[in-house]
Image (spheres, rainbow, N blue to C red):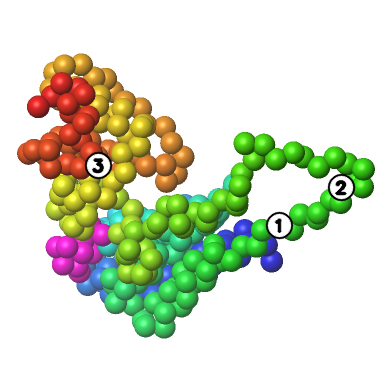
Amino acid sequence: MSAEKETLARVQGGLYHLTRGLTPFVGERMKAVHGERWLHYASRAQGSSPGAALDAYGLLKTMIDSWREVFDDAFTRNEKHRTRGFASVALDARNNTSHLSIPLQDDEALRYLDAMHHLLRAVKAATAEIAELKKLYDAQRQSGLSVPSPAVPALAAPASAPQPAVTQDTPAKALKPWIEVALPHPDVLANRFKESEFAADLFAVDAGYATEDYASPENFYRITFLTQGLKRILTSALQRLSGSGGDPVIGLQTAFGGGKTHTMLAVYHLAKAADLALLEGMGPLAEKSGIR
């Protein structure tokens, strides 16, 4: 089986275990509010029988559509937003795998499986289903590390071919491994980071549910590398906020995972910051823009 098919199979397997783990929770919560006929109040894919058991789509869509009146009080204040976010990502996984037009990417699969795993943990699903989803997530992580490089047959040079002369532009030695050039964060090296919190969440920051690294302007800028593109946007935002110029509208056009949310968070924290001097890397930008 190809790597692409294995990735798709893992996400589909995750949806299978998600369905088994969510069914008791959704049924119990819906029944408590709507009684024995709760299935008639559930959300379903178009054309589904109103009395049939809910599939992954029906379970997740029911949670999202009936969140406020049925599911909100099942979680603590700090869990509410994150859990609903997990349900939304899991629903994306179901929809994207059901209507797949391009191969599922490794980072997408990891995000989907991580969300499904944490959703089952949040609803206190059966231990077996949680364990199976964790296995699928771990297998996907390992698959991304073990893809072999395609073998390229060496071509023997003709006996009479002249050997290239060594010049000043010829590299004296092989390139260093990337891990020596760009050392990962200590949490990544120690495998201590939380996968579900690895992606930025603008609403969670604004609502006060975010983790420490994303919650405050100082911490956010401490862990953020200011690329040239981000510097241009922040400079424009500084000028706009101070009334000295800047673009009124900026269009962020990047691929999935290209940093749109991180960029918006950088602007958000810039606007909220009490002292620009406390934001790592922002001092030179503010000085260059003539802002104190």
2 or 3: tag closer to the N-terminus: 2
The amino acid pointed to by label 3 is Leu
Q: Position of residue 254 (x, y in %)?
A: 43, 36
Q: Which residue is mark 1?
A: 150
The amino acid pointed to by label 2 is Ala
Q: CA distance from mark 2 to mark 3?
A: 55 Å
Task: Please report the residue visible at 62 percent of the width from the left and 58 percent of the height from the top.
Answer: 4
Decide whether the magenta segment is chiefly helix, strand or loop.
helix
The correct choice, above or below, for 246 with respect to 78 in the image is above
- In this rendering, does residue 172 appear at all? yes
3 or 1: tag closer to the N-terminus: 1
Q: Nearer the viewer, residue 212 or 221?
A: 221
Q: Nearer the viewer, residue 165 or 102?
A: 165
- Local crowd at mark 2 within 10 Å, few (<14), some, or many (≥20)? few
Left or right of 108 on screen, residue 30: left
Secondary element under disc 2, as helix, strand or loop, is: loop
Which tag is nearer the camera, tag 3 or tag 1?
1
Left or right of 87 on screen, residue 164: right
Task: Please report the residue visible at 47 percent of the width from the left and 71 percent of the height from the top.
Answer: 138
Region in magenta: 69-82
Left or right of 256 on screen, residue 39: left
